[in-house]
Image (tube, rainbow, N blue to C red):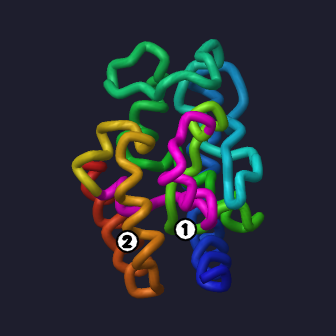
Amino acid sequence: KRAMDIAIALFLVILGLPIFLIIAVCIKLDSPGPILFVQKRVGRNGELFNIFKFRSMHLSSPTYETSPTEPTDPRITRVGRLLRRTGLDETAQLLNVLMGQMSLVGPRPEMPFLVERHIRQHRPRLQVTPGITGLWQLSTDRMFPIHQNTHYDLFYIRNRNCCMDAAILLHTLLFAMRGGV
């Protein structure tokens, strides 16, 4: 799985480099602040790491607050609306995959304060490497917070294999090409 993660992530970084440079320029032209949004998340075995995303919100937005659920949320920048709708804001996490902090497929990494609230049955999520995409992201329940839908992660953890990962990656690609609809 790790070899597949590295090979695919490296391929996507190289292939996407021109797009990532355009995204960086657009973010800089749209609003002041850094190109990347960095936030602490809880990874495998409860270890904290910095997750990377292309910044989609104004610099004045609080770092640890509930994510916007509406595209018209005033915290989101103009470029950020497009990045979020297409999922391109998440592509910076390919760096996390290359650093071994994340996998392409797995449970979403949570913010530390949310992990503290998890009940015991949800702890298995912390025994595996978190991922950029997973079953929850492809479900209709993606409109609700992941910590309310951990059954998707628990199912993935119990049944994961290379074929399931390949299917999730393919569905994620198709989902993104449709604009996340």
Q: Residue 104 has which mark?
A: 1
Q: At which x and y percent is residue 106? A: 51, 65
Asked whether residue 67 is drawn in magenta, I would say: no
Pick whichever, 78 or 159, lies toward us.
159
Mark 1: secondary structure: strand
Name the residue: 61% across, 26% down. Answer: 29
**Is 71 left, or right, of 126 in this rendering?**
left
Name the residue: 49% across, 17% down. Answer: 75
Q: How many marks?
A: 2
Q: Residue 90 has which mark?
A: none
Tell me the quarter of the image containing the N terminus.
bottom right
Q: Amino acid at mark 2?
A: Ile
Q: Earlier in the sequence, mark 1 or mark 2?
A: 1
Identify the residue at the far front of this view. 120
Q: At which x and y percent is residue 64? A: 61, 25
For disc 2, the marked residue is: 168
23 in relation to 168, above or below: above
**Is 101 left, or right, of 68 in this rendering?**
right
Q: At which x and y percent is residue 66? A: 48, 25
Crowd tier of the residue under label 2, counting other residues whose Cα lies within 10 Å: few below 14, some 14–19, many 20 or above: many
99 in relation to 144, above or below: below
Q: Amino acid at mark 1?
A: Leu
Crowd tier of the residue under label 1, counting other residues whose Cα lies within 10 Å: few below 14, some 14–19, many 20 or above: many
Name the residue: 61% across, 43% down. Answer: 53
Name the residue: 47% across, 23% down. Answer: 76
Asked whether residue 127 is drawn in magenta, I would say: yes
Q: At which x and y percent is residue 36? A: 68, 38
Give the CA distance from mark 1 to mark 2: 10 Å
- Range drawn in magenta: 116-138
Pick whichever, 126 or 174, lies toward us.
126
